[in-house]
Amino acid sequence: MEMLEGDFLVAWFLAASRATGLLLLAPVYSGRAIPAPLKGILTLFLAYIAAMSTNLPQGVSASLGGIAIAMVLELVIGLFMGWGVRIVAYAVDFAGQVISTELGFTMGQQLDPLSGSSSNAMGSLLFAFGSLVFLSSGAHQAVVLAFLKSYNVAPMGSFRGSQDVGVMLVVSTGKIFSIALQMAAPLICVNFVISLIFSILGKAAPTMNVFAESFAVRIVVGMLLLGLTLGLTAQLMLDHLVEAPEVMLRLIP
């Protein structure tokens, strides 16, 4: 296939639309740490590989309006695929918010340069740790392979419109909360025990300001427990990152 042929250019544009939707939501790829020109080059490179290995269906209209509609559909497919792998990142961010609340770090809000949103120290720490796990586990390569395999599930320019995708989207979204609570569960339990102990001390020593004294204990014990359970948190991330490519393909509308 010649690079300047009209069919190849159309296939390249369509593949670039799907790759754009994927990279807009995929963890690390969508981060502000990666310059926009580099993201554009990566998008065009992935689209070039997909266009070289995929034939343009005959059903795609050669008119400008038909190509524009097909590009929008490809963008939607890419966004759904990106959401499938973004679930773990959202769960990590939510777990950081829960842990910060339990340890009393909610007052220290700051701008996270990686995500571009307001976050706290614990949320930024877990986000950076999750990005490290994402890269070290090879999940970034699995995302690219799932993108190339997606053309076997949904050929270029096609839109299945399956009703099962809606159910899968709701189920996968619900996993954000379950994964986050599993990550934050040890801190929640310890915080409950500390609150119970200081409540008993408050009854035994009414003159003691147990509310103020408990903050230091929450932080010290919570940080120690977080360090001890960081390996379990990484394993939980890995378990769901392994499933991410399959979820991406099942979320193709």
Image (cartoon, rainbow, N blue to C red):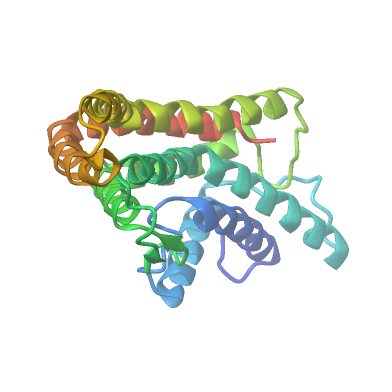
Examine the image and state in which quarter residue 124 appears: bottom left
Residue 52 shows in this picture: no
Apparent side of residue 139 relative to residue 48 in the rendered image (left or right): left
Q: From what the image shows, is residue 38 above or below residue 172?
A: below
Apparent side of residue 158 relative to residue 2 in the rendered image (left or right): right
Q: What's the residue at 27%, 48% (across, down)?
A: 135
User: Can you name the residue that lies furthest to the front here?
Assistant: 207
Q: What's the residue at 15%, 36% (across, down)?
A: 221
Q: From what the image shows, is residue 8 above or below residue 136?
A: below
Q: Position of residue 227 (x, y in %)?
A: 14, 38
Split into 4 quadrants, where in the image is the N terminus?
Answer: bottom right
Examine the image and state in which quarter residue 194 appears: top left
Q: Position of residue 166 (x, y in %)?
A: 71, 29
Number of marks in picture:
0
Q: Position of residue 234 (x, y in %)?
A: 24, 34
Split into 4 quadrants, where in the image is the C terminus?
Answer: top right
Q: Position of residue 87 (x, y in %)?
A: 48, 39
Residue 13 shows in this picture: yes
Q: What's the residue at 74%, 41% (across, down)?
A: 158
Apparent side of residue 141 relative to residue 79 in the rendered image (left or right): left
